Image (cartoon, rainbow, N blue to C red):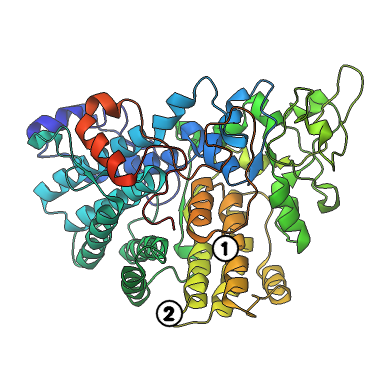
Amino acid sequence: MKKIYSILLSGLLLTAAGCDGDFSDINTNPNSAGSNVFDPNLILPTVSYNYGNMMTGYTGAILFQSMWVQVMASTSTGGANYYSNADKYVASGSTNSYIQNVWNNGYASASRVYQMQKLAEEKGFNNLQAVGTIWKVLTLSFVSDIYGDIPYSEALQAEDGITTPAYDSQSAAYTAMLSDLDNAISSISDSGDPIRNDVLYGGDLAKWKKLGYSIMLRMAMRLVDADPSTAQTYVTKAVSGGVFTSPADEAVLVSDQNNGYSNSSANALNVTDDVYEVRWSDNLIDFLKSTNDPRLPIVAEVPAAGLAANRSAAAGNSDPAVQIGLPNGYDLRGGSTDVSNEPNYPGPTGSGDDVAPIGAYSRPTAIYRDRNAPVFILTYAEIQLLLADAAARGINVPGSASSYYAAGVEAALTSIGKFGGGSVSAGDAAAYAAANPLDTSSSSASLKMINEQIWATTGLFANFVESWNNWKRSGYPELTPVNYTGNFSGGQIPTRQVYPASESTTNPEGLANAISNMGGDTWTTKMWWDK
């Protein structure tokens, strides 16, 4: 065991008192602390940050899923041509690199969790071990939802000689992860070790239990078509155990720019080319405008006229009346797919040498460029909307689809204020929800409305991978794929990322078995729960 301590977090350990975002307040040298004095709680902030970093920014979420699921859009033929992977499913020069980011970061993050748990085990820190399992399941389920079959049962055991772990089928991995999660939550004890250096919940064990059960609910709802019986079992366990009961419970991770732990999506959206070329999609803007959604002026702005203004982060016009979403799949090449040929093209802004062809389209506001912006891991709004989905499907939950939906919408509106920009008051959110109740004329009408709201809400929280995953699960919103010349997915919206090429040399047998089990390794191969 002692051989792992010499490599623990060299230069990466961070700690915090409570949830104030101070990742750096530590006076001991982790490299000089032996296992007998080292507190594994010191690893917890790194574990937390690693997960948040994996689900945001150039790791993949903005480069792929944000535009696959048509929350964002880009002409992606100027400086930011790397967005061709997303908006048009066309490879850029770095696509092969982007493919492996979540895989590599996910397993590196899970390995850090493993180190924390082994140290905790030696010290009898049972609660910290349980929190570690919650993070491990959250992390590796994220990886599985992107790639499909993954190593799970034999993963993270290189120290025990397993360097080429078998890939578990996604069904087997999900079964094991849900069981591990259930056992971990049940083992958390108020009389056990305190959780320290906790940047998420400040050591509140009750909230860790709620997070665990909320993760369980979301995972169970993935299975509603693939394995309805297991879905019902774990939905029931999650609800009876206790999921989030208010926005105060939700997992929203602080960022800390001053100490090097900034929001990765904000880092990306501060790149000058991104400031200009990344826009909200017409699908999203039209969705928000259709009901006068009060989030619209908080999240969207039209830059001042001209190319210079469009490449500047200076605040634009947030009047809802002027917001226009950019249709997906257009470019600036002057051919048939040039955005100027789009039927509703509003025209350029500026004049002379200072023309911005996409200047009239809405872009994200400054809250998305704030490097101290929080990372929305899992929210009360999403949990309420998933419960609404469960109720609409006839899954046995205690409330009605209408009441869950209203609570989810209200929370979606008020929690947008956690970005630190504009906010929606509780009164205005309640009035909006009352004016836009769930359509209960049929289960399909309800499911459409619920899952469109999940898509918009997770998208506006910059949790683009979850927007994509829930679209795969539910089929909503109904999206029209982009069929751009030279695309890598046959003109279909990608439903997974292909495995990293490195796996063919580091774990060829495991990879081959996974590809055979899944029926291929393409961008449109369906994973097990995606029915």
Q: CA distance from mark 1 to mark 2?
A: 18 Å
Q: Mark 2 belongs to which amino acid?
A: Val
The residue drawn where x is 9% and y is 39% is 36
Q: Is residue 195 left or right of residue 84?
A: left
How packed mark 1 is, by other alpha carbons closer than 10 Å (few <14, some 14-19, many 20 or more), is: many
User: Residue 302 versus residue 66: which sits nearer the camera?
Assistant: 66
> Mark 2 falls on what kind of element?
loop
Q: Is residue 377 left or right of residue 308?
A: left
**Residue 385, how many percent across, how many down?**
53, 67
- Kindly identify which residue carries mark 1: 451
- Kindly identify which residue carries mark 2: 397
Point out the image quarter for the N terminus.
top left
The residue drawn where x is 20% and y is 33% is 509
Residue 42 visible in this rendered orientation of the protein: no
The residue drawn where x is 42% and y is 48% is 526
Q: Mark 1 belongs to which amino acid?
A: Asn
The residue drawn where x is 51% and y is 70% is 389
Q: Which mark is residue 442?
A: none
